[in-house]
Amino acid sequence: MIFTGPDESPIAVDRYPDWRSRFGERADRLELEIGCGHGGFALAHARRWPDRALVGIEQRRAFAVDLAARAEARGLGNLLVLQGDARRLAPRLFPAGALAAIHVHFPDPWWKRRHLPRRLVDGGMATLLAGLLRPGGLLDLRTDVERYAVDAAARLEAAGLRNEAGPGGFAPAAPDELPSTRERRYLETGQPVWRLRLRRP
């Protein structure tokens, strides 16, 4: 099976990609961002951490194409942007225990009851994310919806991740934290952001 990225380059997903061939030694510090949006976090992360590799999965094609073009224009060879559904792509792209970190920033809360199955952090996805992390790997989740954060914390802890702030707790902003495009707006207006930092034991 072949998956094409925003630049139409083929990526084989009938087997796991050879990330070392793509990223070199940076593949030893492989991270994933689910839902890159306008790309503020992905671009800043790749620039700050040139010794790490970041794969971004964005469902909206226009956003993915734009972000991939900006990453290329800035010479960020440690950032790869793919367009698609992370629920389907992530388990095809990464074997268990492959990721040093997963970043999920402001996922859609899907308010209506009939839409709840479309929430990103449901029971099945929580188990998948926990399994993709290496021991000690970090799950960095941020949202502006407290109810979503509470529910996500419970599901991720039930999947076996250890909450750095204690069961059900929220983390403070880290001094070196990189905000996403959306989060920068919230920081300017003072709107609260709930942060979860969980690790695989």
Image (cartoon, grey):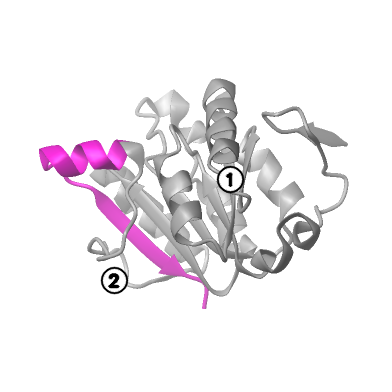
Indicate which disc, 1 or 2, sits on the residue closer to the N terminus: 1
Residue at 63% over, 50% down? 77
Q: Amino acid at mark 1?
A: Gly
Viewer-closest of 158 and 15:
15
Q: Residue furthest top?
A: 62
Q: Is residue 126 left or right of residue 192?
A: right
Based on the displayed image, in which of its 4 quarters is residue 19 positioned? Answer: bottom right
Q: Residue furthest left?
A: 190
The local secondary structure at tag 1 comes to loop
Please give the range of residues in magenta: 182-201
Q: Which residue is mark 2?
A: 165
Q: Position of residue 79 (x, y in %)?
A: 59, 48
Residue at 52% over, 48% down? 33
Screen quadrant of the N terminus: top right
Viewer-closest of 183 and 122:
183
Q: Which mark is residue 196?
A: none
Residue 61 in the image: above or below residue 49: above
Mark 1 vs mark 2: in front: 1
Q: Amino acid at mark 2?
A: Ala
The verdict on residue 197 being magenta is yes
Q: Is residue 123 left or right of residue 153?
A: right
Q: Which residue is mark 1?
A: 75
Q: Position of residue 72 (x, y in %)?
A: 60, 38
Residue 192 in the image: above or below residue 22: above
Q: Is residue 156 left or right of residue 180?
A: right
Residue 98 visible: no
CA distance for labels 1 and 2: 37 Å
Q: Position of residue 136 (x, y in %)?
A: 52, 76
